[in-house]
């Protein structure tokens, strides 16, 4: 590959990093402080933002150099969108700047970088460069120092239409572009002392009043200009930081404060940071402290969540009794106490008690900052009813809409998570994935492990269910690491369950069974491991064991499978009547009726497979073949085998290919008997599930076209006495190889 022409001329964009300075050093030889190295990452993110806007990309950092002032210089930019996510490129650059492996050591630059790397180390979802710019500036506020203006200058550039561009959040860009300056003038402005004012413009007013009005970012900016002067003000600032999801900074700001309200806020931060043991210790230390009724209610909610996640006896019952007993004179707190009790009942799967507390808390619907929580809990309760999916979605939407402008960042993230789970429950997997991407966007701005253990985990689960497995194993490993570190046994059980689903998607049911056992050890009362185990045992032909596992699964848990899977899991467990009940009312009812009647299903009963995504259709073909060998039409059999092979599910693909009678193998024999019958050959290919295939015979002379057709990317060849027979089609079965 040759070198690209001069970037500045050929691609029509201007950027400080796209120059060839007269004097510069390779990245590995330049002496930079840690702060300057983080500044280089900011420059790189700014450059990637402009290149993405211009339809260009970087192949990597080979040849990148450092010029005067710590300016990054990259001479090569190639046409087309980048095949690699921005976070991968920045991780590669981080390894060059800081070395491979973990970034150890003290200092604010290295602390900031460790926080950034925690979010960049996933390839499941690309992070837009503009979002990365925001992450860097939030994690590394020292980049606003005057001596690091060179790094900020790289946020400005000019794309091919002659208009300036600013990398970063939309509001930041709008404030700068409103100045109507050239790209170079904007770069000077960003490098100067007034740049930070465009990032977080100051607002007049007392920071405490701003925080009370829900303007938390403005309040925190005001406190940065004038630090809190009292312990009470430090608590107010910490509460604003918690609302923004900055739990680490809030906890740091509360250090040394002994007031009960400060310690109660510490417990909230510890929970959200995944420090479950520390949170439990803080709660124990507050048991005899004088607290306001609202604080008691919040601590009761924190205590129940800590105990549910750790699966170790705690003092949640003490806090719930105290909340229910000490709030009689405070109507709002009394409603909050009942909502906390409803959440605790859900955790221990006491749904009758949960319903009772929800009914007692129904007046919360008239309190704007409590209504969302009532709807959220109602969605959790409805999710435990068979057929409750539509009600779950309705309640989740209501929770998200209730007083949404005043929700703390993590609360809003949790509501998007609930909506994603609700959509998945009713089979809307694309809609669920969109909701989880909103969840990830919100959690990316929060401290703590939930961006990994909740947001990326749920995206990974939807990807597994849709047969899109890239990045899933990596996300699972990171989630397990986080949950082991924090002692979150509930989260670890869910990790093992998803790992078992992943193994099933790869066609490894025996491995899935082992993981189901590990999930059960983490949380014995969850029914999901039995459901996944029944699925695996059915594929292995162990019907009696599958039936035994399935008998322990509540009907509502079966709704966690897709509509086309539910009849299969019952059929494979030797329950044809149950399979027909599950299929009734779905597009696949006719198919399962034909399969379970002992004969071949009508040809038209396979047509609904076309509405499914390729992996789900392939899995249904495999389920049908497990239930009734030889039932699938040839073209569905081959399409399913090809899909499963592309996914890496080798065993199911081989099973389907073994069921294939090999009509392409018969082609050679047919040609030997009737070499001059192109219409018969075309009919044979169409009957084998390959209409439009192209067939040619290559001899020592020129090729002879036997069957004209559009062909396809898959090619199959075999040698005959007359020459080499070549078939081109859309897909082919590996078992059809001669």
Image (spheres, rainbow, N blue to C red):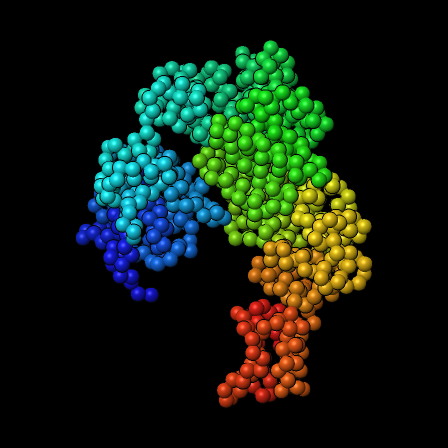
Q: Which percent across, then down, holds residue 481?
A: 53, 41
User: 475 above or below 200?
Assistant: below
Q: Residue furthest top?
A: 329
Q: Is residue 279 above or below residue 558?
A: above
Q: Quadrant of the C terminus?
A: bottom right
| Picture quarter with the N terminus | bottom left
Is residue 356 in sight in this rendering? yes
The answer, for residue 103, to whether it is visible in the render is no
Q: Position of residue 425 (x, y in %)?
A: 64, 42
Q: Nearer the viewer, residue 279 or 385?
A: 385
* x, y percent for residue 164: 28, 45
Q: How many marks?
A: 0
User: Which residue shows up at 61% across the image and 43% down it?
Assistant: 424
Q: Residue at x 65, y 60 (%)?
A: 652
Q: Quadrant of residue 399?
A: top right
Task: Identify the image quadrant of residue 493.
Answer: top right
331 sits left or right of 179 in the view: right
Where on the picture, by quarter, is residue 416?
top right
The residue located at (36%, 18%) in the rendering is: 206
Q: Position of residue 183 (x, y in %)?
A: 25, 44
Q: Is residue 629 above or below residue 678?
A: above
Identify the residue shown where x is 49% and y is 19%.
Answer: 263
């Amino acid at each position: 590959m040759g070198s690209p022409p001069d970037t500045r001329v050929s691609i029509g964009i201007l950027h400080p990093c796209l120059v060839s300075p007269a004097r510069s050093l390779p990245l590995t030889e330049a002496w930079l402080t840690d702060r300057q190295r983080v500044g280089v990452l900011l420059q790189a993110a700014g450059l990637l933002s402009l290149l993405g806007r211009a339809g260009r990309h970087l192949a990597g950092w080979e040849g990148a150099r450092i010029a005067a002032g710590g300016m990054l210089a990259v001479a090569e930019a190639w046409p087309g969108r980048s095949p690699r996510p921005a976070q991968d490129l920045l991780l590669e650059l981080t390894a060059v700047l800081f070395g491979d492996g973990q970034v150890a050591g003290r200092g604010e630059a290295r602390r900031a970088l460790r926080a950034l790397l925690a979010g960049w180390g996933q390839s499941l979802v690309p992070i837009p460069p503009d979002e990365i710019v925001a992450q860097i500036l939030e994690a590394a506020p020292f980049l606003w120092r005057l001596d690091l203006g060179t790094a900020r200058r790289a946020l400005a550039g000019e794309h091919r239409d002659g208009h300036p561009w600013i990398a970063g959040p939309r509001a930041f860009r709008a404030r700068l572009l409103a100045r109507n300056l050239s790209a170079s003038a904007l770069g000077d402005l960003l490098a100067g002392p007034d740049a930070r004012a465009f990032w977080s413009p100051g607002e007049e007013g007392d920071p405490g009043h701003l925080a009370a009005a829900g303007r938390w970012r403005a309040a925190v900016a005001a406190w940065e200009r004038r630090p809190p002067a009292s312990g009470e003000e430090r608590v107010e600032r910490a509460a604003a930081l918690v609302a923004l999801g900055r739990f680490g900074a809030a906890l740091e700001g509360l250090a040394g404060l002994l007031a009960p309200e400060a310690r109660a806020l510490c417990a909230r931060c510890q929970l959200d940071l995944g420090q479950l043991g520390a949170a439990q210790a803080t709660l124990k230390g507050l048991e005899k402290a004088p607290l306001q009724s609202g604080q008691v209610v919040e601590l009761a909610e924190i205590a129940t969540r800590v105990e549910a996640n750790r699966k170790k006896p705690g003092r949640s019952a003490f806090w719930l009794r105290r909340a229910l007993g000490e709030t009689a004179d405070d109507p709002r707190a009394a409603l909050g106490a009942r909502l906390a009790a409803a959440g605790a009942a859900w955790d221990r799967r006491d749904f009758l008690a949960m319903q009772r507390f929800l009914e007692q808390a129904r007046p919360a619907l008239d309190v704007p900052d409590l209504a969302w929580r009532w709807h959220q809990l109602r969605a959790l309760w409805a999710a435990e009813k068979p057929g409750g999916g539509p009600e779950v979605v309705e309640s989740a939407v209501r929770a998200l809409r209730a007083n949404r402008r005043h929700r703390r960042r993590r609360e809003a993230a949790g509501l998007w998570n609930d909506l994603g789970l609700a959509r998945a429950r009713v089979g809307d997997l694309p809609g669920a994935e969109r909701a989880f991407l909103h969840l990830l966007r919100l959690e990316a701005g929060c401290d703590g492990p939930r961006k990994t253990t909740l947001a990326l985990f749920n995206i990974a689960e939807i990807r597994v269910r849709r047969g899109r497995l890239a990045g899933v194993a990596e996300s699972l490993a990171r989630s397990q690491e986080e949950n082991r570190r924090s002692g979150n046994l509930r989260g670890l059980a869910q990790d093992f369950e998803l790992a078992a689903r992943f193994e099933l998607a790869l066609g490894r049911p025996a491995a899935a069974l082992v993981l189901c056992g590990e999930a059960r050890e983490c949380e014995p009362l969850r029914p999901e491991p039995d459901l996944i185990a029944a699925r695996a045992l059915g594929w292995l032909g162990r019907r009696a064991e599958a039936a035994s596992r399935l008998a322990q699964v509540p009907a509502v848990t079966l709704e966690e499978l897709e509509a086309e899977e539910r009849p299969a899991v019952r059929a494979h467990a030797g329950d044809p009547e149950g399979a027909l009940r599950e299929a009734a009312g779905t597009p696949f009812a006719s198919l399962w009726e034909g399969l379970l009647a002992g004969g071949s299903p009508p040809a038209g009963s396979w047509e609904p497979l076309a509405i499914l995504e390729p992996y789900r259709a392939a899995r249904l073909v495999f389920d049908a073949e497990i239930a009734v060998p030889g039932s699938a039409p040839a073209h569905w059999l081959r399409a399913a085998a090809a899909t499963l092979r592309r996914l890496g599910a080798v065993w199911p693909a081989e099973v389907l290919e073994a069921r294939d009678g090999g009509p392409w193998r018969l082609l050679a024999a047919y040609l030997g008997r009737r070499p001059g019958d192109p219409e018969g050959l075309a009919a044979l290919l169409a009957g084998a599930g390959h209409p439009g295939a192209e067939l040619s015979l290559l001899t020592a002379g020129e090729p002879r076209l036997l069957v004209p057709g559009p062909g396809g990317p898959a090619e199959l060849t075999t040698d005959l006495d007359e020459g080499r027979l070549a078939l081109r089609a859309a897909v082919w079965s590996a078992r059809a190889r001669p």
